Structures are given as structure tokens and as C-alpha cells.
């Protein structure tokens, strides 16, 4: 089964069905919720930095849905991880004030 896994194209085809669409939907909803909270909690002198983060998060969320529609579930999941990583980074750098440890690494 695994002897052909590293041949060109095989890895993607083998993995694309390994992430459930429901998992993509769950993390899309979670990241969108976190984005909404972060947008309302930007520190006054960090607005520009916050907007830059929110643009990146929104772009990755959009990419995730595009990949999901194409059936590229691994790519969709990766985009969601990047999106949430940007949000966590902003929280750790105190670009916005958040305290919900369910949504942020705080």
C-alpha cells in the first residue's frame, strides 16, 4: 500500500480523503468566530497591525473554502491552520485583547 506513496501525484490523492469535510466546516466556523472577536478587541495604537492580520486571516479563510469546493481537503485544512495561526500570533503579540483560550493561544 505505501510503496507508491511518494510517486508524483500519489501523496495528494492518498491524503485528500483523509480529512472530513465536517472537520473543515468545524474549524472554519471556529476561526471565523475568533476573527469576529479579535476585530472588536484591537488595541487603539495597534489598528494598522490588526488590519494586516485580519486581511491575511480573511484571505486564508477564503482559500480554505475554495480548496474545499475543489475537493482539496488537505489544502483547505492547511489554509485554516494558517488563518488561525495568524490570529494566535496577534493575540500573543497583544495586537488585540482576547482571553478566550478556546479560540486563542493565550
Image (cartoon, rainbow, N blue to C red):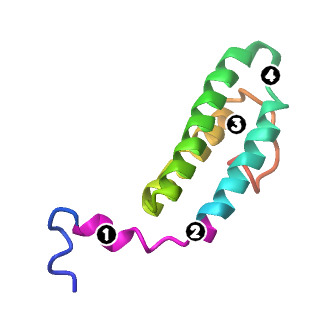
Q: Quadrant of the N terminus?
A: bottom left
Main SS of the magenta segment? helix
Assign a secondary structure to mark 3: helix
Q: Secondary structure at mark 4?
A: loop
Specify start and end residues of the magenta stretch as a single range. Answer: 10-23
Q: Earlier in the sequence, mark 3 or mark 1?
A: 1
Disc nearer the start of the sequence (1/4): 1
Instruction: Quickly name the residue at label 3.
Output: 91
Q: Earlier in the sequence, mark 4 or mark 2?
A: 2
Q: Nearer the viewer, mark 2 or mark 3?
A: 2
Residue 11, above or below 94: below
Gap between marks 2 and 3, in whole Å? Answer: 28 Å
Q: Which mark is residue 43?
A: 4
Task: Say how many tags the image has.
Answer: 4
Count neighbours of disc 1 (C-alpha within 10 A) and say few if under 14, some if 14 to 19, many if 20 or more: few
Q: Earlier in the sequence, mark 2 or mark 3?
A: 2
Of all residues shown, which one is farthest toward the bottom? 1
Task: Say which quarter of the image contains residue 58.
Answer: top right
Q: Is residue 15 magenta?
A: yes
Q: Are marks 3 and 1 in contact (CB under 8 Å)?
A: no
Q: Nearer the viewer, mark 4 or mark 2?
A: 2
Q: Residue at (62%, 28%) from the top-left corner?
A: 55
10 Å neighbourhood of mark 2: few (<14), some, or many (≥20)?
some
Q: Is residue 59 above or below residue 81?
A: above
Task: Report the residue at 82% width, 16% height from top.
Answer: 44
- Residue, disc 2: 21
Between the C-alphas of marks 3 and 1, the distance is 36 Å
Amino acid at each position: 500500500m505505501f510503496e507508491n506513496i511518494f510517486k508524483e501525484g500519489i501523496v495528494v490523492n492518498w491524503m485528500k480523503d483523509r480529512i472530513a469535510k465536517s472537520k473543515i466546516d468545524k474549524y472554519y466556523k471556529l476561526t471565523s468566530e475568533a476573527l469576529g472577536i479579535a476585530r472588536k478587541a484591537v488595541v487603539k495604537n495597534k489598528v494598522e497591525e490588526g488590519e494586516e492580520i485580519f486581511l491575511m486571516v480573511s484571505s486564508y479563510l477564503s482559500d480554505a473554502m475554495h480548496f474545499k469546493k475543489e475537493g482539496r481537503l488537505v489544502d483547505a485544512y492547511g489554509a485554516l491552520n494558517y488563518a488561525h495561526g495568524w490570529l494566535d500570533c496577534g493575540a500573543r503579540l497583544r495586537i488585540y485583547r482576547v482571553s478566550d483560550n478556546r479560540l486563542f493561544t493565550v
